Each structure stands twice: as C-alpha cells, then as structure tokens.
Image (cartoon, grey):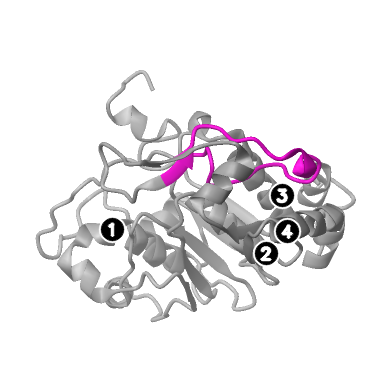
Amino acid sequence: LESLLFEVSDPKNSKFGQYLNRQQVANLTSNIEGTEFVSKYLNQNGIKIVKSTPHGEYITAKASVELWEKMFATTFYTFNHVENAVKPVVRSTHYSIPSELANHVSAVFNTAQLPPRVPAKRLRTLKGSAPEKSGSITPAVLNSYYDITSNKGNNLGSQCLFESLGQYYSPADLTQFQEAYDLPKEEVAVDVGGYVSDSECVDDPNNCIEANLDVQYIMAVSQVTPTTYWYEDAADSFLAWIQAVAASDAPPLVNSISYGAIENELPASIANAFNTEAMKLGVQGVSILVSSGDDGVANFQARTNPKK
C-alpha cells in the first residue's frame, strides 16, 4: 500500500495519477475472513456489534465493563484529567487479546490508549472590531506571500476542515469576513458533527477562534470549491475522523488539519491505524495537509520549555 501511494503520487513515476477507487482499495487491504471470524466470536460471547466500516476494517462493539474485563483479562478504571476540564475516560493499563482472535485483530481501541494531551485553552480578549494593522494576515497578504495568482477553485473539487476540542464556526462571522474583504458570499456546503453556532461565538469568542479562522481562510483562498466542516468529538478524534473519511464513498479531496498531538505520546496502534487510513486515502488521490500549529512541530510543549 505504501509503495503504491508513492508511485501514484510521484510525477516522475509512470503510475502517477493512476488512482484507485474505494472498492479497489478494499480489494487490496480488506480481510474478509478476519472480519467474519471476529464478528462471529463477539456474537457468541454476548457482545453487541454496533457498526462496522463498509469493508470490515473496524468493528465497533458494545458490552458491559465486566464482560470486556473478562474478555481482555484486564481491569478498567475511570481517568480524569488533572489540568483540563475534559470528559473522563474509561481505560485499562493493559489488555490481552484472546488467543482465538490473535491472528485477526491488530489492536483494540479505547482500552489502554489514553487520549492525546491537548493544551489548555488560551483565552483572548476581543474588544470590538480590531482595525487592520501593518503585519496583519489578510487574504491578500496570503496571496502575495505564497504567489497565489487566482483564488477561483473548482466546484468539481472539494475541501474539508477537521475540527475538534469544542470549536464552533459562525455562519454570521463568515458572512461578515467575506463582506470585509470583498469576497464572494458562500456558505459551507456540508456540516458533519453539528458544531455550527452564531450564539456560541457571541457568548464566548474563544469557542470559535480556531474554527472561524480555518473556515474563513480556506474559503477565501479557494473560492467556489465546496467546503465540508467536519467536527469530531471522540476522545481519539484524529483516528475517529480519518476512519470516517476513509469509509466514505466520495471523501473530500483536500483535507486540512490544524490540530496536533505529541507524537511520541501516541500509542503505536493509533499511529499505525491513522497512517494506514491516510495511505488508503492517498492512493485514491485524496490529500491531507497538516499544519505545524501555533507552536511549531514541538507543539504546546514549546510554550514552557525553550529547549523544545
């Protein structure tokens, strides 16, 4: 899969641009026997299957904590974050996969994997409409700096924003932004997750700073292109998001992520699963662009540790 990704992505390769469709990716990566075996095993042990991805790569199941503890030979605890007011999570410190499943299961998520650390919210005080100052970043500045000669996108294309951490975007703010910079008035074409609210942004602008920035500027730089606002509230939001995108029959062609996690704190199972889904999307001609964030690649650690 990785070799194929590089082949179809390299302009110098004879296979450049010869992307696969979703079914062809499934033919290359799915494990029908494994999916059927795991499903049967769960049913026989009284565990309810909630859903499965279209080609059986991931199975979501529900059971009592006691049943999971017995199956995985472990104990689950409730973990609370001592610094940030995030939702408690139920996790174990280890787990064992039953021998019958060992050849079919690569990982069981939401067991021993704690959610990635996130920075505490940086509050910003906004006083009315801030006048444009020298050094301000505007759509025109981005066009000049990156030598963008046209902002006209294509309505046959598609672009998507990954959002999380309780961030909303405001349609009213988007309209105001477009009017302020004489941009075409456009709306977000697709909303996934429902984190759209004018009132949330009025009540506390910090609830919308990240999402508003993302929405307003991607639509300013690439106009006409249909935009998807994709909010993911799961504890492992990166993995949940990319699983959902990769399961789509027609995923957005350009995906932007302006969030980050500290890589060496991510369990290998989550990192490997994310990479696999990213490669599946890549061989279909889908791009994923990830920024280095407010603090650079060192992430929010750099705020308090100059050595980072």
- Residue 290 in sight from this viewpoint: yes
Q: Residues within 10 Å of mark 3 (few under 14, many from 20)?
A: many
Callout 3 amino acid: Met
Q: Position of residue 300 (x, y in %)?
A: 35, 35
Q: Position of residue 62 (x, y in %)?
A: 56, 59
Q: Residue furthest left?
A: 127
Under circle 4, the secondary element is helix
| Mark sitting earlier along the chain (1/3) | 1
Reply above or below: 233 against 219.
above
Q: Which stretch is magenta?
A: 90-114
Callout 4 amino acid: Gln
Q: Between marks 1 and 4, how big is the CA–CA gap?
A: 48 Å
- The disc at residue 209 is 1
- The disc at residue 44 is 4
Q: Residues within 10 Å of mark 2 (few under 14, many from 20)?
A: some
Under circle 1, the secondary element is helix
Residue drawn at the location 17% of the way across and 51% of the way down: 124
Residue drawn at the location 33% of the way across and 60% of the way down: 167
| Mark sitting earlier along the chain (2/1) | 2
Q: Residue furthest top?
A: 307
